[in-house]
Amino acid sequence: MGIADDAKNKAEDLKGRAKEGFGAATGDDDLKAEGQADQGSASVKQKISEAGDKIKEGVDSVKDKLTGNS
């Protein structure tokens, strides 16, 4: 849940796009499907990371209100 995770997710997405494109160009349906799966996995990981960030923001907001740091 941070810049490093976002970079890893983007790299996985790009790797998946490359695999999908190469698979499509060469007629390799398995490689194309693997690339699509990589992209899907990266997308799910990114959504989880975003949700975690939102939860952390909410917790920090509540903590600030309780401690009077708002």
Image (cartoon, grey):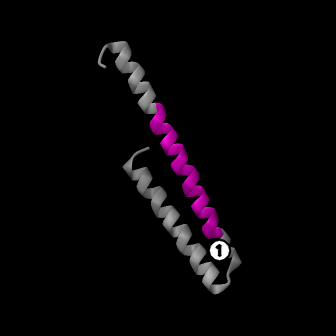
> Is residue 45 within the magenta segment?
yes
Quadrant location of the C terminus?
top left
* Residue located at (39% from left, 24% from top): 61
Q: Mark 1 points at which residue?
A: 32
* Residue located at (56% from left, 68% from top): 16
Q: Establish if 10 lies above or below 33.
A: above
Chain part drawn in magenta: 34-55
Name of the residue lying farthest toward the front: 70
Q: Establish if 47 lies above or below 10.
A: above
> Is residue 62 within the magenta segment?
no
- Residue 64: image location, x then y, percent: 35, 20
* Residue located at (64% from left, 63% from top): 37
Looking at the rendered structure, the kind of residue marked 1 is: Lys
Left or right of residue 36: residue 5: left
Q: Establish if 67 lies above or below 23.
A: above
Left or right of residue 38: residue 9: left
